[in-house]
Every structure is written in structure tokens, then in C-alpha cells.
Amino acid sequence: MKITDINITGYEWNRPKPLRNGKYIYPKGGIAVITIDTDSGVYGLGITGGVTIIPFGIIKAFVDEFKPILIGENPFDVEKIWAQLWAPKVVGRRGLSTKIISLIDIALWDIRGKATNQPLHKLLGGYQESIPVYLAGGYYEEGKTLSDLSSEMSSYVELGVTSVKMKIGGASIAQDIERVRIARDAIGPDVNLMVDANNAYTYSEAIRIAKRLEEFDIFWFEEPVAPDDYRGHKLVADATSIPIAAGENEFTRYGFRDLIEGQCVAILNPDAQVLGGITEFMKVAALAQAYNLPISPHGLQELHIHLATAIPNGMILEYYNSTTDPMWGKCFKQHLVLEEGYAIPSSDPGLGIEIDTQGLKPYKIL
């Protein structure tokens, strides 16, 4: 089997109201899809998108740059291809280039699954048949009241989940403490509550709010400081009883090695769409096992359900619904649904998802 072509398609849409977290504003949603074709007729999909998305023009430029390297290669040679693409002196060590490599690698693994007629979670290890999820939301929006936040959090619990996550860092510490109090009251004492600052704080600010959050029995405090501030993560972790979670903006096994060895985090949030693809994700998961650290992946749930259920240290899956994106459930022909707070991976070969090109046609921009 040989790779014959690689192409990129992009879709983008406006949100009714921009979403805001502790640091960023998201007025649009969208997905980018890399398709890798082979001479056997089997093709693979690499998908990114959701709340944020890489600029389409940058993706296309990198795809065009990488295409001559990929054409003629055996798609099963993921380690060889990864090494050829991740050339630090040529395309950069971290950042957008590694994100594009991630999408290519995901598409190669999709081909692997389809060619062997195996769903990805079985191909990667098949450790568990389902995994609990947490509902991610609690964003800042124009006109959103504390009552609205309370109703949103309550609606998540009504879906059967036992964990929910909300944003902090986009208001004053006093205002966010009140928002967290409202959320805790809404979900009750028996539901896990995570908070996510999206890098909004300095380490001293993060310590201040962490001390005040402890009374609300917070399950984890995610990304309290800038992604590269390993020392800041360590200082926050040492100052609070709340477990620190991070990793959605981390690149390659080397970045996660530094997070782990620096004792910066108690929970890792790797994103295969960011860190270097599935090939690199599995190395991070294995490294985390050696330190008895749990994995709760960040990003596209239809992809990460496979990775979280394939490994022994997959703890919980991030799950978004229509409260964060008007196109939720409309991008793919298949849809990941919840059963009593758990998600079950597709039994179809590879990723088990196909793009709904007809439904997305009005939003195609590339």
C-alpha cells in the first residue's frame, strides 16, 4: 500500500454569541479535514476543530510542503513518516507545524484501522469498552447571568454525567469565586467540579484563587498559568490541595517529560491534534503510566474516545454538546452519544467517523 495524495478541506461558521474563557474569545467554529489517499482505495481522515481551529491557509501551506515527502510512502510506516516530517531545523520544533503533523499522523492511523478492519481503540490496546465523561462548558458570554450558569450546570447533570467543567480567569477573583459557588450549588456535592483558567493567571494569582477554591471541593484546576511556565505550575501545585491538570497546549513526549519530571501536574490533558498525533500520544500515555499519572485527553471527543479507552490510565473523556457549538452533532455522519454518563467508542474500522459533506457544504471555505 502506498500514499498517492493528500488534501485539505476547511469549514467555518459563526457562533450566535462569541464564547470567552479566561484568555481567549471564539467568535467562530469550524473544522479542518486532511484526507490521505492510497493506491488500495483506503483513505484516512485527520480532523481538527471545535472551539478553536488552526488558520486554514497555514494548514494548506504545510500540507503542500509535506506532500512530496508523503507521496509513495507506506501509510503503515508511522514512525518513519513522523520522523521525516518533524525536522526541527526545517519546519520548527513546536507550534503549528507539529499540529499539522498531528493531523497527518491521525489520518495514517485511520488508514491502519480501515486496512485491518479494526476500530482504533482495539488497534491501540483495547483496555476498556467505555469511559466516563465530563461535560465541558461554563464559558463567559455576553448577557450570561449567574442564573444562566446555574441552569447550564444543572442541565449537564441531568444528562447523567458525574463530572462537569467551567471556565475561570475571565473575571475578577471575587466574581469567579461566586460563579464557582453558584455552579457547586447547582450540581450538588456528589458531582465532580473542574475549573479551567486557560493560562489566564500568573502563578501568584493562581495560588490566591486556588486557596479560595478549595472549600468547593474542586476535582482539578486546569491550566492555571502559561503552558511553558513549568516553574509556575510547580509553585501552584505545591501551594494547593487541588490537583493541577495541564497538557492541552503541550508538544511531543519531550514537553510531557518536562511536565512530569518537574512535578507540575497530577493529571495530564494531552491532545493528539496538537502534540504530534496518535503516534506521539501513545508515547506520552506510556510515560505517564510509569509515573502512575492519569490521562484525560483534551480535544475532539470522536477521536479521543478511542485513545482514552485504549490505555490503562485513561481516566475520563472531555465531552462538548450544543451549548458550545451550533454545529455540534452535525459535522459527522456518526455521533458520539452518552449512556448514563459514559461514552462508548465506535466499533467501525479506524476512527469510525465520516464527514457529513452535504450538511457542511454551506460552510465550506477551502
Image (cartoon, grey):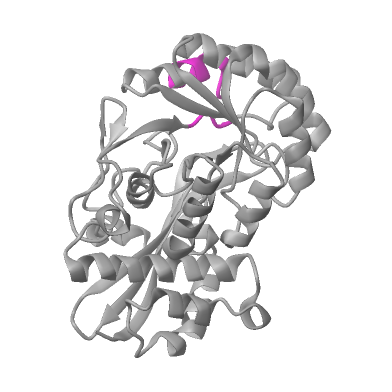
| Residue 4, image quadrant | bottom left
In depth, the one of 197 and 79 nearer the eye is 79
The residue lying at 48 percent from left, 9 percent from top is 189
Res 142 visible: no
The residue lying at 42 percent from left, 61 percent from top is 278
The residue lying at 44 percent from left, 66 percent from top is 103
Q: Is residue 179 above or below residue 263?
A: above
| Residue 9, image quadrant | bottom left
The residue lying at 61 percent from left, 53 percent from top is 256
Can you give x and y, in whole percent of width and height, for residue 210 in the image? 71, 24
Total numbered circles: 0
Decide whether residue 84 is among the magenta residues: no
Q: Is residue 140 above or below residue 327?
A: above
Tell which residue pokes out farthest to the front in this image. Answer: 290
Q: Which residues are magenta?
A: 137-152
Can you give x and y, in whole percent of width and height, for residue 173 in the image? 74, 22
User: The N terminus is located in which quarter?
Assistant: bottom left
Specify whether 301 is left or right of 339. Answer: right
In depth, the one of 69 and 33 nearer the eye is 69
Decide whether residue 139 is among the magenta residues: yes
Can you give x and y, in whole percent of width and height, for residue 285 in the image? 48, 51
